[in-house]
Amino acid sequence: MQLADKLNVYSEQNTALSGSGWLSVGSLSGHTQLFCGDIVEVEVYDSEGLVKDLSFSFAIESDLQGEPQNWSREVAHYINTHIPLMQAGKITEHGLIVAYRGNEIFACARSGITEVSFNFNCVAKPQKSTSHCEHGYDHIFPVNHESYRAGDRVLHMATGKVYRCKPWPFTEFCRLGASNHDQYEPGVGLNWRTAWEEIQS
């Protein structure tokens, strides 16, 4: 379905988020710390694949804006302002509001939109990671595990091997590979392959 056709469908739809008129197609969890220069890539999909006309990039212009609760709220506001086929927020007794965290993304049921995903183009990596790069890894597990990103390489001292964090949506599991979520510990945990791939030397 072309973008113009989707917008026509939307104009016929009741815009209130109630009943079966809207479907949940993604969420803005807001757990990822970003920095000035990073980019949030928002990709919208229907049954035929990526819908380029509805997808967009959101540039982080300051470290403060990169705080998880800040960029996720701003992306939600952008969706509500610029993409009439979708709405973002939390449904409350007062209607849809953009919350501090955990905003959900809804699509007009007749639009054909099936999923909204997020990729992070991070150009502002922490300086402490660069000292390891010449050795073939970015981090030593589990140091700074909460900030692991897709493509980050970690050295696991117990196995002596390097593992690469998988792309979204598996990236979140990379950050859970310590403490109470040791099933995702690279090379060791029961479910480590869900989050990681071993880099062959």
Image (cartoon, grey):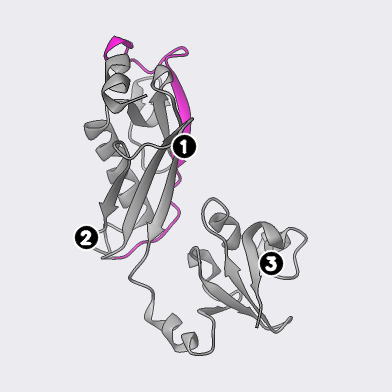
Q: Which amino acid does label 3 sit on?
A: Glu
Question: To which quarter of the image does residue 127 belong?
Answer: bottom left
Q: Which amino acid does label 2 sit on?
A: Glu
* Secondary structure of residue under mark 3: loop
Q: Position of residue 30 (x, y in %)?
A: 42, 49
Q: In this view, does 156 lie to the left or right of 63?
A: right
Question: To which quarter of the image does residue 130 belong?
Answer: bottom left
Residues 150 and 5: in front is: 5
Could you tell me which residue is drawn at 39 percent across and 43 percent down? 43
Evaluate whether residue 1 shows in this view: yes
Q: For mark 1, what is the residue?
A: 26
The residue segment tinted magenta is 11-35
Q: Main secondary structure of the magenta part?
A: loop
* Secondary structure of residue under mark 1: strand
Q: Are marks 3 and 2 in contact (CB under 8 Å)?
A: no
Gap between marks 3 and 1 measured at Cα: 26 Å
Q: For mark 3, what is the residue?
A: 185
Q: For mark 2, what is the residue?
A: 61
Q: Where is residue 133 in the image (x, y as percent from the top left)?
A: 47, 85
